[in-house]
Image (tube, rainbow, N blue to C red):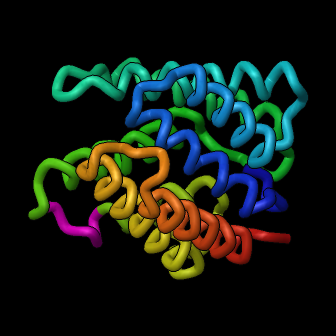
Amino acid sequence: MPRGFDPVRVGNFETDAWAAYYRREWRTFLMASIGMVAAGFGMNRGKTLLGAWLVLRANQKWAPYPDNDPDAARDLMRRFYALVARGSDELALDPARASRLELEWWRLHRARQHDPGVPRSALEQSLVDLYTYVYAVEPDSVRAAAAARVEAMDFSDAWVAAGCRANDPLLEHERRALVASYTALRRAVGT
């Protein structure tokens, strides 16, 4: 994401994407992904649509449990990060490394969903690692953003366990936590 993204818009779109992901509402996911990529990366319309499509396909490859395809998901996210890197003067990154870091938090989140013994700190650290690399900032500057995003994941997981109801108040808790996460990230990386 360029450093000047709107944390409220990105957090709201990501909440919608997460809800659609767990309900397997792929069209809704794509629409939220378009909004999230547009708000977060500021690319032109064609690159935004391609980026959103790559994110959708990566999530579809990741979604099946336990028989997902992490290699395909990682490759799609590599292509996404390559698109982002080509379109940004602010981010200098290796798309392969960024996609490995991205998929690592996906992996740890899924592991934590199915094994409460997976420490929250490991998931938070994986997000710190991703943010530190993508934005070239100090780890301590993004810890609050990582912690709030994991809190959002906890609300999301509780929402899934409760049946994925659209009117469940847990979604609003998730939304607030994601907005708080992106607000902290924007503060840490902003110019």
Q: Which residues are magenta?
A: 118-122
Give residue 85's position: percent from left, percent from top.
73, 37
The number of numbered badges drawn on the structure is: 0
Magenta stretch: includes residue 68: no
Q: Could you say which quadrant of the image residue 51 lies in?
A: top right
Q: Main secondary structure of the magenta part?
A: helix
Give residue 101's position: percent from left, percent from top.
44, 47
Q: Is residue 154 left or right of residue 44?
A: left
Going 56% across and 50% down the picture, which residue do you hit?
Answer: 15
Going 48% across and 72% down the picture, which residue do you hit?
Answer: 148
Q: Could you say which quadrant of the image residue 3 lies in?
A: bottom right
Going 85% across and 42% down the picture, which residue do you hit?
Answer: 42
Give residue 26's position: percent from left, percent from top.
51, 22
Q: Is residue 44 left or right of residue 128?
A: right
In the displayed structure, 59 sits above or below 16; it is above
Going 48% across and 62% down the picture, which residue do you hit?
Answer: 174
In this view, the residue in front, 134 or 40, is 40
Q: Could you say which quadrant of the image residue 61 lies in?
A: top left
Report the quarter where the C terminus lies.
bottom right
Q: Residue furthest front?
A: 167
Residue 128 visible, this angle: yes
In the displayed structure, 71 sits above or below 163; it is above
In the displayed structure, 30 sits above or below 7; it is above
In this view, the residue in front, 148 or 139, is 148
In the displayed structure, 109 sits above or below 67; it is below
Residue 132 visible, this angle: no
Give residue 115's position: percent from left, percent from top.
11, 54
